[in-house]
Image (cartoon, helix red, strand yellow):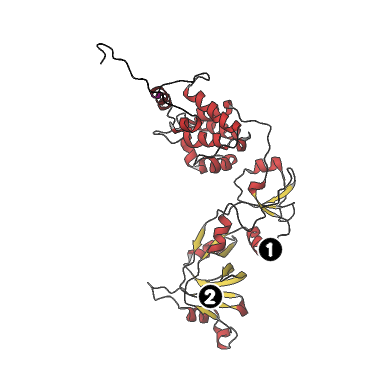
Amino acid sequence: MDYRLRLYCQIDGVDYYDWTVCFQDSSYLNDFIESGKNVAVIGADIVNRFEEENCKYLDDNFVPKHGSSIHLVSGCPVGIADVRKNYTLKRKPDDGECNVFSPFNGSWRIIWNSAYAIIPSKRTIVLSNQNRWDNSGLDIEHMILHFFPEEAKTNELVPVMIYKKDIALFFTVIQEEWLMLLKGELKKPCISYKKLEFKTDNEVNQDILYLVYKTGIQRYNEEAKKAFHIQLCALNEHNWRDYPGTISILLSQLLRPRRGQYCLDDLGSPSRLPKAVKEMMSHCRHTYLPFKSQEDLAMAQKLIKYIVDIPDDMQFSSIDKIIEKFREKCVDIECFYRLFDNIVKFRPKAFKENES
């Protein structure tokens, strides 16, 4: 199947933006294109930059005022309801004070090729589909003739630069805003979603954290699952972004997978969870995050002591006793080491008659 798609790539420092790429590929791509989606071919280096948290194409200095109008490019991990509470959304690019992007997380598929030709007069790059394992494909010279039979006869394609090597290209479905960003067509500042500020009067506290924990460790059934999801959404309504260390301990350690079927198992399948908690899960679920403040650290200490039943005024304990408390609650002892300084005092035991 023949394809002519929009191309955005860089070769030897030269931009080939809004060019056309001609190639042959398997027929299922045709269904992909006919679905009406915005398909484009992107160079591998650009793909990598689009996926970076600190994308080089974005403005790292501009910060929109809280409550101002913004255009939010689709794909933001923050729930749309959270964004609406803090900013006014505009539907079209450049209609707000800035355009807000998130790392591109769409699917990419590589276009296999063995050689390519640059044809400036046609603003086109042609790919060969012949490879070292299969000689049934067309080499680059025959591919040029295949796509431009008449022009090749009349020398309308001169000059043609032929390179007998592959080029790393991917096709994907992509928002038009990304292509406008790439071409410099957006006039308002373009920033990362991390520049947005989310304010709430709901302060994270031990009660909401414990409710998430308590409902998460319940045996799985529809009612228990619903209660767990409700508590996760309730936590999302609080200022959890000010407590990244505490939330990461809650989601990655206290609610870690267990044997048997528990509500917390839904955390391992984001598609099962409410969209409102998508950002919180992606940010805090898989790793320990550093504490943001003394308040963050103190909240985590308070939560752990409450769950494993360590009295607030307890300052001394045996190693065995601490380990046993954590084991009973299925909490990793690493949480203790991370949250509390400790020291072991060696005191020789005294011999007792008839003691085994």
Q: Earlier in the sequence, mark 1 or mark 2?
A: 2
Q: Which mark is residue 126?
A: 2
Instruction: Give the magenta range.
Output: 315-319
Question: Toward the viewer: 295 or 263?
Answer: 295
Question: Toward the viewer: 74 or 289?
Answer: 289
Image coords of residue 242 (percent x, y):
62, 36
What residue is pinned by disc 1? Answer: 184
Quote the CA–CA distance across marks 1 and 2: 25 Å
Crowd around label 2: few <14 · some 14–19 · many ≥20 (10 Å): many
Q: Residue at x 58, y 57 (%)?
A: 50
Amino acid at the residue labelled 2: Val
Image coords of residue 52 (percent x, y):
57, 54
Q: How many marks?
A: 2
Amino acid at the residue labelled 1: Gly
Given this view, does label 1 or label 2 mark the residue nearer the observer? 1
Image coords of residue 45 (percent x, y):
55, 63
